[in-house]
């Protein structure tokens, strides 16, 4: 091989290795960016409610916030769902603990309250007033809300049912909040999906609730990004 050809071959080899080093550097940089994104703080949602949120008489892993968090993580979301459910809580109780239960680091709230108001036959106007105040407070803090609706037991009569059941849609529209019309959709009045009291879902029942509400929660997540 002539001297000039040796020089050309050597230059080609050098160019190849230089390109490989550059490519490797770009790959490492890309990987570093990906790792930085993976290490970002998870989004934080609070499930604020009563025993239906708390996971009444269920193993911890079957509670609604735990199953919802798992379902969202399986879909690729970097997210934490905080369980702020208190068994037996009414909308009055929720209003009294709202500010200290939902900190400044919260990205969004799933508001599930009102079932105990109806079970106790409390005046629907009081339930409406309390939920209205909670939504107003969260709105003033720029925290998006998914309002989970509830329905009055039929034994309370048509008038009570009409007054109570209209609360959630009215307030969601008033405060421009997302609405999931009935938290127990697909589970209420299904004996095999409820505990012996006929009111609280089993682990299987919670899974159905999560499956049905998941698209609405994903809409809430999108709102937190805006």
Image (cartoon, rainbow, N blue to C red):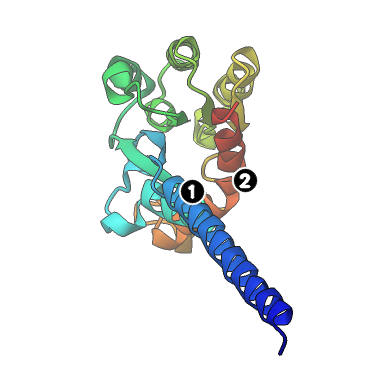
Instruction: Please tell me how crowded label 1 is: few (under 14), some (14-19), or many (20+) other residues with Cα within 10 Å.
Output: few
Measuring 41% from the left and 42% from the top, which residue is drawn there?
40
Give the secondary structure at mark 1: helix
Viewer-side residue, 32 vs 173: 32
Viewer-side residue, 76 vs 18: 18
Q: Residue furthest front?
A: 3
With respect to residue 54, does 94 lie above or below? above
Image coords of residue 216 (percent x, y): 60, 40
Q: Name which of mark 1 and mark 2 comes first in the sequence.
A: 1
Give the secondary structure at mark 2: helix
Image coords of residue 211 (percent x, y): 56, 54
With respect to residue 126, does 210 lie above or below? below
Residue 223: image quadrant is top right
Measuring 44% from the left and 50% from the top, which residue is drawn there?
38
Measuring 27% from the left and 59% from the top, which residue is drawn there?
59
Can residue 187 be seen by looking at this rendering? no
Exactly how many numbered labels are in the figure? 2
Image coords of residue 11 (percent x, y): 65, 71
With respect to residue 22, does 220 lie above or below? above
Q: Which residue is mark 2?
A: 215
Viewer-side residue, 8 vs 219: 8
Labelled disc at residue 9: none
Q: Which residue is mark 1?
A: 33
Q: Are marks 1 and 2 in contact (CB under 8 Å)?
A: no
Task: Name the quadrant of the C terminus.
Answer: top right
**Left or right of 54 in this view: 8:** right
Can residue 201 be seen by looking at this rendering? yes
With respect to residue 127, does 56 lie above or below? below
Image coords of residue 34 (percent x, y): 49, 52
Numbered disc in front, either 1 or 2: 1
Task: Name the quadrant of the N terminus.
Answer: bottom right
């Amino acid at each position: 091989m002539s001297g000039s050809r040796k020089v050309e071959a050597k230059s080609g080899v050098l160019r190849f290795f230089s390109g490989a080093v550059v490519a490797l550097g770009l790959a490492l940089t890309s990987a570093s960016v990906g790792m930085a994104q993976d290490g970002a703080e998870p989004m934080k949602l609070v499930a604020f409610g009563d025993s239906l949120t708390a996971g009444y008489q269920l193993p911890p892993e079957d509670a609604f916030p735990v199953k919802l968090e798992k379902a969202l993580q399986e879909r690729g979301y970097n997210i934490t769902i905080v369980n702020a459910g208190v068994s037996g809580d009414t909308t009055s109780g929720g209003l009294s603990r709202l500010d200290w239960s939902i900190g400044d680091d919260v990205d969004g709230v799933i508001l599930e309250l009102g079932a105990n108001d109806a079970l106790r036959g409390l005046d629907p106007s009081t339930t409406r007033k309390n939920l209205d105040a909670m939504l107003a407070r969260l709105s003033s803090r720029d925290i998006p809300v998914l309002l989970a609706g509830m329905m009055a037991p039929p034994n309370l009569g048509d008038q009570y049912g009409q007054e109570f059941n209209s609360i959630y849609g009215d307030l969601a529209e008033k405060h421009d909040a997302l609405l999931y019309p009935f938290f127990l959709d697909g589970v209420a009045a299904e004996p095999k999906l409820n505990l012996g009291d006929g009111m609280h879902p089993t682990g299987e029942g919670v899974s159905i609730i999560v499956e049905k509400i998941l698209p609405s929660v994903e809409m809430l997540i999108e709102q937190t990004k805006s």
